[in-house]
Image (cartoon, grey):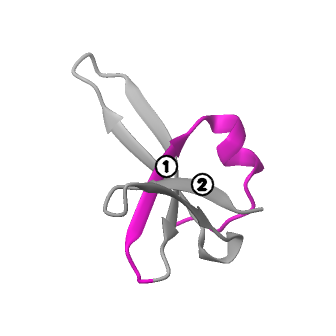
Amino acid sequence: MAVSFYDVKAKAMVEVPDNKLKKTKYERTTKSGSLQVRYALRGETSDGRKLTKFVNKQTWDSTNAPME
């Protein structure tokens, strides 16, 4: 299953195959002290540029990709 990313440089949607996908989590502490977690899929184009797509937790959990 390929994932669609928006390539800012090419100004177009790009399909990235599963073998170039990685999962990552961005965690930060807010001013009020609570923990905010954002889930993302990271991909790489054929010429080596990195792409990031933020997704919900259900999509992140269901994706079979290694953690970054």
Percent of width and height locating residue 51:
43, 62
Percent of width and height locating residue 28:
33, 38
Give the numbered dot on residue 4: 2
| Most distant residue in the left direction | 31
The N terminus appears in which quarter of the rendering? bottom right
Give the numbered dot on residue 53: 1
Q: Is mark 1 on a helix, strand or loop?
A: strand
Q: In which quarter of the image is residue 47?
A: bottom left
39 vs 13: above or below? above
Q: Nearer the observer, disc 2 or disc 1?
A: 2
Q: How many marks?
A: 2
Q: 11 or 67, which lies in front? A: 11
Q: Of the residues under marks 2 and 1, which one precedes in the sequence?
A: 2
Q: Which residue is drawn at 50% across and 81% down?
A: 46
Q: In this view, does 32 lie to the left or right of 61?
A: left
User: Is residue 18 part of the magenta span, yes or no?
Assistant: no
Amino acid at the residue labelled 2: Ser
Q: 3 or 35, which lies in front? A: 3
Percent of width and height locating residue 43:
51, 66
Please report the bounds of the magenta region as a residue range: 47-68
Percent of width and height locating residue 26:
41, 46
Q: Which residue is drawn at 21% across and 21% down?
A: 31
| Most distant residue in the bottom direction | 47
Q: Residue at x 75, y 61 (%)?
A: 64
Whether pointer 2 and pointer 1 mark residues with C-beta atoms closer than 8 Å, the reply is yes
Q: Is residue 62 left or right of residue 3?
A: right
